[in-house]
Amino acid sequence: MALSNVTPVLFHLICLLAHAISAEDCPKMLLLGTEFPNFTANSTEGVINLHEYLGDSWGILFAHPADFTPVCTTELARVVKLMPEFEKRNVKVIGMSPDKVENHQSWAKDIKMYAGVSEDSSFPYPIIADEDRSISIKLNMIDMMEKNKEGVPLTARGVFIICPKKLFRLSILYPATTGRNFNEILRVVDSLQMTDKHPVATPVDWKAGESVMIQPSLPQEKANELFAGTHTVTLPSGKPYMRMAPQPAIPN
Ligand code: BEZ
């Protein structure tokens, strides 16, 4: 049997053995633009049904290997500080870790202190308790290189963006040893919200306010109609595919 066939089989077996879950729960590849898997889970804000909780908002689900760990604490604190930015963009954020709710609640005090917010303030977003790690497995977030004391693979730092139609729009999977950059996540939200409304795309390292690119499929006559101030970059190939436009409004 080819190695490419063996590896998924091994992973499947590890899932079954390590977590005693059914075959249907084993990971399937998520495809961009398809419905994001729904689930119901316990959290610091009670039982959450993901799709119901998100309602008409965009959603960001971000997972962590464990409570009371240093990198995770810095990440959750950064999200606390960035709450006004998420709210401005109509985004609900949800944290997740494979610990129990009581631990999350106690950990939240550390996170608030690290974020520099009042200890009396309520924690601004829910943290899901993925105790049996069924969500981590369902969403392909198991890191086979990072293991806990018992030798069980950790949940990776997965981050998922879900649009109001409940479609899966982005995922980035970071290893336990690398903290995320939540400014990058906000940058992607800006790009997604704008490109959902306008036939444009955002170039490398784009930030809100900078020029955008007209999507290759848009005919030039239509581009002239839709965007004032476009220009085409001259390239050695002579092909007029790099069409720039001022940034249209970002909704929300
Ligand atoms: C952390 O959050 O600091 C961490 C968690 C698991 C492995 C390595 C680092």
Image (tube, rainbow, N blue to C red):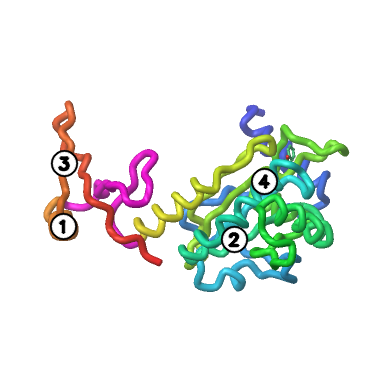
> Does label 3 or label 1 sit earlier along the sequence?
1
- Going by the numbered disc 3, the residue's amino acid type is Thr
Q: In which quarter of the image is ligand 1?
A: top right
Q: Is residue 243 left or right of residue 45?
A: left
Q: Which is more foreground, mark 3 or mark 1?
A: 3
Classed neighbour count for the residue bearing mark 1: other residues with Cα under 10 Å, few (<14), some (14–19), many (≥20): few
Q: Can residue 26 be seen in this view?
A: no
Q: Which is more foreground, mark 2 or mark 4?
A: 4
Classed neighbour count for the residue bearing mark 3: other residues with Cα under 10 Å, few (<14), some (14–19), many (≥20): some
The residue sitting at 51% across, 57% down in the picture is 168
The CA distance from mark 3 to mark 4 is 43 Å
Residue 128: image x %, image y %? 72, 60
Depth check: 119 or 221 in front?
119
Instruction: Label 1, secondary structure: give it.
Output: helix
- Going by the numbered disc 4, the residue's amino acid type is Thr
Q: Is residue 50 left or right of residue 41?
A: left
Classed neighbour count for the residue bearing mark 4: other residues with Cα under 10 Å, few (<14), some (14–19), many (≥20): some
The image quadrant that residue 14 belongs to is top right
The CA distance from mark 3 to mark 1 is 14 Å
* Quadrant position of the C terminus in the picture: bottom left
The CA distance from mark 1 to mark 2 is 37 Å
Q: Is residue 199 left or right of residue 157?
A: left
Mark 1 sits on what residue?
A: 222
Q: Residue 232 carries which label?
A: 3
The CA distance from mark 2 to mark 4 is 16 Å
> Does label 2 or label 4 sit earlier along the sequence?
4
